[in-house]
Image (cartoon, grey):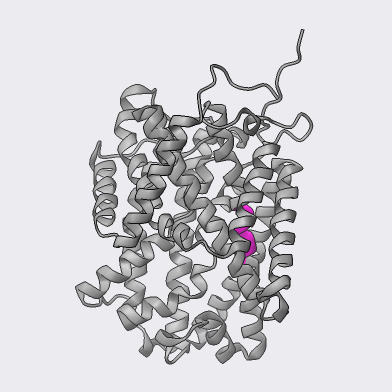
Amino acid sequence: MTAPAPRFVRAVGLAGLIAIAVNGVVGSGIFVLPATAAAIAGAASPSAYVLAAIVMALVVLCFAEAGSLFEETGGPYLYAREAFGPFAGFLVGWMFFLSRLAASAAIANAFAAYLGFFWPAAASGAGRVAVLTAMIGALAAANFAGVKWGSRTVDVLTVAKMLPLLFFVAAGLFAADPARYRLFALPPVPALREATLLLIFAFGGFENANVPAEEVRDPRRHLPIAVIAAIAYTAVLYVLIQVVTLGTLPGLASDRTPIASAASRFLGPAGGALMTVAAVLSTLGSESALVLVGPRILWAFSHGGRLPAALARIHERHRTPHVAIVAFAAVAWIAAVAGSFAWLAAVSAIARLVFSTATCLAVPVLRRRLAPGPFRLPGGLVIPLAASALCLWLLAGIHRDQALAGAVALAAGYLLYLFAGRRSSPPAS
């Protein structure tokens, strides 16, 4: 008689799930976004953050309901597969995986660049390769050792990167000149639309929390709370950061390091250094969440029979998808070290819209096929259809290079679907 195959352990609680979601949203982007938003919408740019948060909340609510229906690992891949079939599910999951890979490569390089402020050798050459190797290797090792270790790493880094940002906001609100920003004013409609479209993507990343459901305690109840809390928290944080930078930094629109520059003005050189430390911790925290989530997508593919069986193995002792962790870390390292991931960055924008649209459209279908979960959207089809329409509207406005990169990615996913083969049963460990 053979021993039963190892299974995941439910070690991630509500706080850990919120940390995964927040880490996905608050990455390296917030350290440059204030300048970009100010360049587009000027003193009224805080309103663009509010509008983007409201719009993105529609999509978040759809992810909340979809997540409340399942206890299996997979996130958007799982939702699309159950609603529209294995082919659509695989393509959606493939685009989701590419978006995580692109983010991992970009954030790893941002980490090395920020670290270069303190150690110049980290920003280029052999020093950069060493930093990328050490960072990705250490995070992979923590996740290999157990989901509890991986989740705790995310928790610690979330707190570590939030404390400097909260201090920046608390100190900066007293130093900010109210005449330099208009909290409740709206910029011209074209500027508001452009800034909102930019910032909608800045609120992405919460969906990381939807993936590792089999390792979360009471995922059907906790997931909706986690993603809604994450988007609400980050919306308030982003608006306050924009207010502080507008109110303390003349020439914000053209500043390349707006948060560090603003902190230097009202906290002195130590403030600028503190915000650079925050940027290092923020990128490291975001990377830790991606190294936790990315392998689970590969595991879900393999468990469903669409990738080699080894990727679905669960370590007998650590109860982690150890082969998938090593595979994801290796691919992420190659993409980060090579530095030629511009095409992945282009894919990332369209990929987010593809899996977000699919999840929003899946909600009405899943309602008919599955028993209600603990979280159900009010208003019938209003929110899922409005969120789907929003995603399709944004998808129609992508640039030509993004469309080409997205088409190449989808074609690659189609070929992988055809030639990967299907196993008749889940693999043993």
Is residue 68 in sight in this rendering?
no
Q: Is residue 390 left or right of residue 180?
A: left
Quadrant that contains the C terminus = top right
Residue 97, position as x, y percentages in the image: 50, 46
Quadrant that contains the N terminus = top right
In the picture as drawn, the residue positioned furthest to the right comes out as 317
**Residue 283 among those drawn in magenta:** yes
Query: Measured along the vertical axis of the image, is residue 294 above or below residue 268?
Result: above
Image quadrant assignment for residue 366: top left
Front residue of 365 and 168: 365
Query: Measured along the vertical axis of the image, is residue 415 above or below residue 240?
Result: above
> Residue at the spot x=29%, y=61% of the render?
400
Is residue 210 in sight in this rendering?
yes
Q: Is residue 247 left or right of residue 42?
A: right
Q: Tell me where the magenta segment starts and ends, as one range.
A: 282-289
Front residue of 162 and 119: 119
> Residue at the spot x=34%, y=22% of the render?
369
> Residue at the spot x=35%, y=47% of the render?
354
Residue 39, position as x, y percentages in the image: 35, 82
Query: Measured along the vertical axis of the image, is residue 37 above or below residue 416?
Result: below
Residue 304, position as x, y percentages in the image: 52, 27
In the picture as drawn, the residue positioned furthest to the top comes out as 1
> Residue at the spot x=45%, y=69% of the render?
238
Image quadrant assignment for residue 364: top left
Front residue of 316 and 221: 316
Residue 420, position as x, y percentages in the image: 51, 31
Q: Is residue 233 left or right of residue 165?
A: left
